[in-house]
Amino acid sequence: MTQTSTILAASQGAAWRLSRGEEVSIVNTHGSQVVDTWALAAEDPSEHSAMEHTRSKNSTIFLDEGLAVMSSKRRPMLTLVADTTPGRHDTLLCPCSAEIYAELGQPAGHRSCTGNFHEAIGALGLSLGFTPASLNLFMQVPLESDGRVRREPPASRPGDSVRLRAEMDLILVLSACPQDVTPINGAECRPRDVELLFHGVPA
Ligand SMILES: [Zn+2]
């Protein structure tokens, strides 16, 4: 099995074409970086990862080991095959966007996961007229019994990783979240690089 490594730079996004069976590890090098994650079906990129179908199929609001991200056509896209983190991964909250940074008083042009998504698929010659909800890897959003959610820094530690397997030919889109106003990427409010290991398709 071939294996290649690359760095997803802090606050940046990127997209890759994965074949069915291919796996990728996302290593949280510094421990507290949230990674917004999407998938688009290769044969029809309008079929996208859909958190509402993911929660419905799995009967949980978190993505835990062994569970799959489902598509807008309710097909499995990415299975979380391994996870060294102590926490769960958020499916509830939207990717950060220009509008959110405006709410936070930031100047126009602040990078966002939404912007990273469209920039990354654009680099592959694709476009989508909306932004699908993201799977927010490493993001810690506990649910209270009264339905309120809290936003806490990731519980992951440096070197923790998750491993995803493509269940169809797809386009994987990742954004190393640029959020530097709230502590969702850690108490230092400092976006960080993450490392990606692509494992290829087993022979
Ligand atoms: Zn973000």
Image (cartoon, helix red, strand yellow):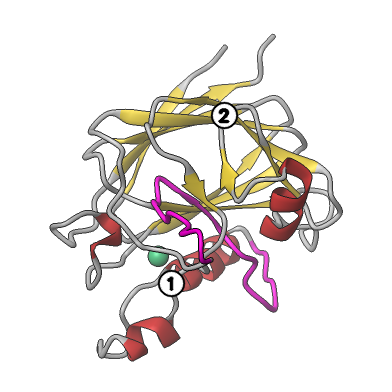
As drawn, the label of residue 65 is: 2
Residue 82 or residue 170, whichever sits in front: 82
Q: Residue, x 40% and y 82% (percent of image)?
A: 100
**Residue 36 is a magenta residue:** no
Mark 2 → mark 1, Cα distance in angstroms: 25 Å
> In the image, which residues are magenta?
125-146
Q: Is mark 2 within 8 Å of ligand 1?
A: no
**Up/down of 42 relative to 72, above or below:** above
Q: Residue, x 56% and y 46% (percent of image)?
A: 62
Residue 202 or residue 49, whichever sits in front: 49
Query: Which mark is first along the chain, 1 or 2?
Result: 2
Q: In which of the image's four quarters is ligand 1 placed?
A: bottom left
Q: Amino acid at mark 1?
A: Cys
**Residue 139 is a magenta residue:** yes
Residue 118 as seen in the image, left or right of residue 113? right
As drawn, the residue found furthest toward the left would be 188
Split into 4 quadrants, where in the image is the C terminus?
top right
Secondary structure state at the residue bearing disc 2: loop
**Up/down of 65 relative to 60, above or below:** above
- Marks 1 and 2: in contact by CB < 8 Å? no
Q: Residues within 10 Å of mark 1 (few under 14, many from 20)?
A: some
As drawn, the label of residue 96 is: 1
Residue 123 as seen in the image, left or right of residue 149? right
Q: Is mark 1 within 8 Å of ligand 1?
A: yes
Q: Principal SS element in the magenta part? A: loop
